[in-house]
Amino acid sequence: MISNNIIPARDTASVLIVDDLQSDTELIETVFKSDDFRVFKSANPVEAIDTFETCHPDIAIIDITMRDINGFQLCRIFKDMAGRRFFPVVLIAAHSDRGSKIKGFESGADDFISRPFDPREFLARIRS
């Protein structure tokens, strides 16, 4: 007999955006909301860690240049907090020299995106 159970729809994916510049955060938020992501925002790394623990986002987008804890350090913190669970982190920067990219990947980042970025390419990279 075939079951009549209906498979529930996939939950909306969620993203945590960590950037101390509100204008940059709003731009990234617009990109993700256009693709039906649930968006969490944090203006500083300490707040971001709390949001990570309470909201359990599916992915993080982190600006590399922030005070106190930089994006590289926050990437490592998130990866450690995720433990064995796969948690993708994308670092984003206004200037992305080769050294910054290497440092980003060494900190555990899954991708590194330079500003300015094309919104369609950005989402395609996130989906892949």
Image (cartoon, rainbow, N blue to C red):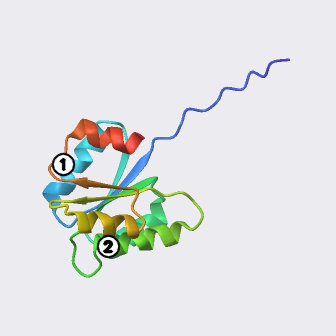
The residue that appears at 36% across and 37% down in the rendered structure is: 36
Q: In this view, does 8 lie above or below 87?
A: above
- Looking at this rendering, what residue extends furthest in the front direction? 98
Query: Can you identify the residue that label 1 sits on?
Result: 27
Asked whether, in this view, residue 79 is left or right of residue 67, the answer is right
Type of amino acid under label 1: Leu
Report the Cα–Cα distance between label 2 and label 1: 19 Å
Determine the secondary structure under disc 2.
Answer: helix
Query: Can you identify the residue that label 2 sits on?
Result: 45
List x then y, in percent, for residue 113.
Answer: 26, 53
Q: How crowded is mark 1: few (under 14 residues within 10 Å), some or many (20 or more)?
A: few
- Looking at this rendering, what residue extends furthest in the right direction? 1
The residue that appears at 23% across and 43% down in the rendered structure is: 30
Type of amino acid under label 2: Pro
List x then y, in percent, for residue 74.
Answer: 36, 72
Determine the secondary structure under disc 1.
Answer: helix
